[in-house]
């Protein structure tokens, strides 16, 4: 069988059929299910486990769970914040005390939300991110010799030498040229350029200018396009702008193997592009989420977000209370502007294959224009 026109150099390098990645999505407490990762890899793309908020033991458990489901290559995505305060400890009680002491208005806001939304006072048991927490996560990825290690934020230069030793490819996610140059300097194998339209943490530059600018800045290091890619047209556009692959988040939140809240899937299926807005409310960094009443309440305070990870700690108790009360509408639903185009749930394999077929058709249509 002849190879698809979409079989780029990246496919040979990573031993996959199509240059389509399930983006790393590590939403707190949920993360990407191994079933979804394996389904994307089995379909010929590459599944990435979003593990940013999972402790090292859980990261290992999930890697093994994917291996039980598929023998195809897959990767892990972690957050490596560049600005993480080294004095931060994983002890939540200590961080809460610090917020109460140094940021009393923020603490009062977080408390007021419980009454406003009729939630029982709750204390989150989630681990908080710290340099030690992240170092242990990275160690597991290296020990397990995964195919790809993706760094969602920050500087992976300290991971690159370890990854080279174990044959793991490193990717770094960026939203502007300056960070792309930093990733190149760090020695990553691929730069993922993620535009403003994307779901989750995002920058200010849209994909049309971002992808070609990043390609120009980091070449010959190959670039992967991320943000608002969900069908053949958007995939072909990413490749046309110079990318060798596409990193797809929001579209896979509607995969049948996805485990996000049904309420959140409904928000994606029914919401328009304008309903997915930029906020610092839940993590302290700009992120694109479905606009909900917690974000509205935060905006009304006029407060400045706390530095990561403190803003997350500020709202984690509320999220835990909302989980317990089954109030998904109060929990952050990170998703991109392309939600405005998505209307139905499908198996992950169907999402991959319809992107492949659609992109092949676009390329054929464009080639026919020369005749
Ligand atoms: C629910 C969700 C969670 C995300 N979590 C992470 C994460 O933990 N690490 C990361 O590198 N990127 C994360 N992202 C960004 C994605 O990796 C990806 O770049 C983005 O989803 C691409 O845009 P799209 O959603 O329009 O496809 C997340 C995105 C979403 C939608």
Image: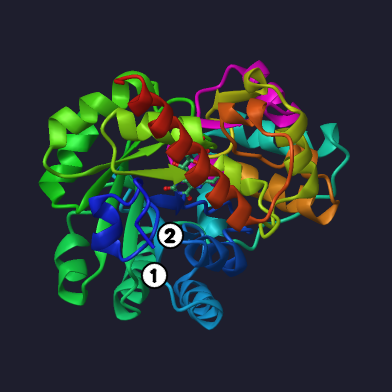
Q: Residue furthest front?
A: 371
Quadrant in which residue 285 is drawn: top left
Labels 2 & 1 near each other (Cβ < 8 A):
yes
> Between 27 and 109, which is closer to the camera in this rendering?
27
Name which residue lies at 18% across and 70% down: 162
Query: Which residue in the structure is indicated by mark 1?
Result: 73
Residue 232 sits above or below residue 89 on the image? above
Secondary element at image label 2: loop
Residue 167 sits above or below residue 294 on the image? below
- Residue 132: x, y in percent? 35, 65
Query: Which scheme is used to colour this image of the protein?
Result: rainbow
**Residue extent of the magenta highlight:** 285-313
> Between 158 and 123, which is closer to the camera in this rendering?
158
- Residue 114: x, y in percent? 80, 40
> Between 33 and 204, which is closer to the camera in this rendering?
33
Quadrant in which residue 125 is drawn: bottom right
Q: From where the camera sits, is residue 212 visible?
A: yes
* Left or right placement of residue 121 versus residue 223 in this view: right
Numbered label attached to residue 53: none
Q: From where the camera sits, is residue 228 visible?
A: no
Name which residue lies at 26% across and 32% down: 242
Query: Which residue in the structure is indicated by mark 2?
Result: 46
* Left or right placement of residue 325 versus residue 251 in this view: right
User: How many other residues sit within 10 Å of disc 1, few (<14), some (14-19) or many (≥20)?
Assistant: many
Name which residue lies at 31% across and 29% down: 240
- Residue 148: x, y in percent? 32, 63
Secondary element at image label 1: loop
């Amino acid at each position: 069988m002849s190879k698809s026109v979409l079989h780029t150099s990246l496919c040979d390098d990573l031993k996959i059929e199509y240059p389509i990645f399930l983006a790393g999505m590590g939403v707190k407490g949920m993360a990407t299910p191994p079933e979804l990762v394996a389904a994307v890899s089995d379909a010929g793309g590459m599944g990435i486990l979003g593990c940013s908020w999972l402790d090292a033991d859980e990261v290992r458990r999930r890697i093994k769970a994917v291996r039980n489901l598929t023998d195809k290559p897959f990767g892990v995505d972690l957050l490596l914040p560049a600005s993480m305060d080294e004095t931060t400890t994983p002890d939540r009680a200590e961080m809460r005390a610090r917020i109460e002491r140094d940021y009393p208005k923020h603490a009062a806001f977080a408390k007021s939300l419980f009454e406003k939304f009729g939630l029982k006072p709750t204390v989150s048991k989630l681990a908080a991110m710290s340099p030690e927490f992240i170092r242990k996560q990275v160690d597991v990825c290296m020990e397990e010799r995964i195919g790809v290690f993706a760094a969602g934020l920050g500087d992976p230069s300290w991971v690159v030498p370890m990854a080279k030793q174990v044959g793991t490819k490193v990717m770094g996610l960026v939203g502007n040229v300056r960070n792309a140059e930093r990733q190149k300097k760090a020695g990553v194998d691929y730069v993922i350029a993620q535009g403003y339209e994307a779901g989750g943490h995002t920058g200010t530059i849209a994909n049309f200018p971002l992808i070609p600018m990043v390609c120009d800045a980091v070449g010959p290091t190959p670039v992967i396009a991320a943000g608002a890619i969900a069908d053949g047209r958007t995939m072909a556009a990413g490749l046309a702008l110079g990318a060798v692959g596409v990193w797809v988040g929001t579209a896979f939140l509607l995969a049948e193997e996805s485990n996000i809240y049904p309420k959140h899937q409904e928000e994606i299926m029914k919401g328009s592009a304008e309903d997915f807005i930029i906020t610092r409310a839940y993590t302290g960094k700009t992120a694109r989420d479905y606009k909900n009443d917690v974000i509205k309440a935060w905006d009304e305070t006029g407060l400045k977000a706390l530095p990561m990870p403190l803003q997350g700690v500020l709202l984690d108790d509320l999220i835990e209370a909302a989980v317990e009360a089954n109030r998904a509408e109060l929990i952050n639903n990170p998703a991109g502007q392309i939600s405005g185009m998505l209307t139905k749930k499908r198996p992950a394999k169907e999402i991959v294959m319809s992107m492949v077929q659609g992109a092949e058709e676009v390329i054929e249509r464009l080639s026919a224009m020369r005749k």
